[in-house]
Amino acid sequence: MINRITLLTLVLALSTLAIACGGGKNFSLTEEPGTEIRIYEVFGMDCPGCHVGVEKLVNRVDGVVTSVANWTKKQIAIKVRSSDNVSDEAIFDAIKEANFTPGKRLD
């Protein structure tokens, strides 16, 4: 009985940690006037903490408002200013700089 309680506690703790670290993130970005949402594949994100580095570098691209990566879906959603004409190549370069492999644009 104690082993079952211990196992259940461990499973709940790990699930909570994964969600808190971004594993359960949904793409909650919403388009606003003058912005658009783009979704890209990102390969190589294998842990809940992986999203931090790729978001940080993508957010540095001129014209990017914000981004949300989801390691379980292997995707990143990016809100960009429409007027800045952010190129896919600039996004791919940021993903590569974070040591991940960019896939195709999905939107």
Image (cartoon, helix red, strand yellow):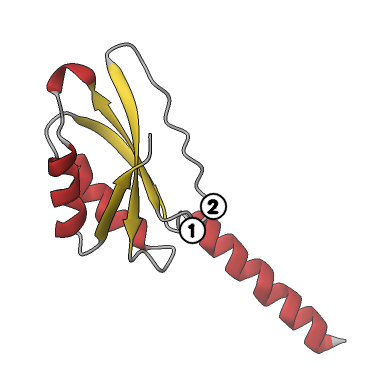
Q: Mark 1 points at which residue?
A: 72
Residue 60 visible in the shown view: no
Q: Specify the quadrant that holds the C terminus.
A: top left
Position of residue 10 measured from the top left corner of the image (x, y, whole percent): 66, 76
* Residue ID at (38%, 63%): 49
Residue 24: which disc?
A: 2
User: Residue at left 13%, top 50%?
Assistant: 93
Residue 5 location, x and y as percent? 80, 79
Dot 1 amino acid type = Thr
Q: Nearer the viewer, mark 2 or mark 1?
A: 1
Residue placed farthest to the top in the image? 33
Amino acid type, callout 2: Gly
Secondary structure under the numbered disc 1 in the rendered image: loop
Kindly report the distance in space between the C-alpha atoms of the residues bearing marks 2 and 1: 8 Å
Mark 1, residues whose alpha carbon is within 10 Å: few (<14), some, or many (≥20)? some
Contact check, label 2 and label 1, Cβ < 8 Å = yes
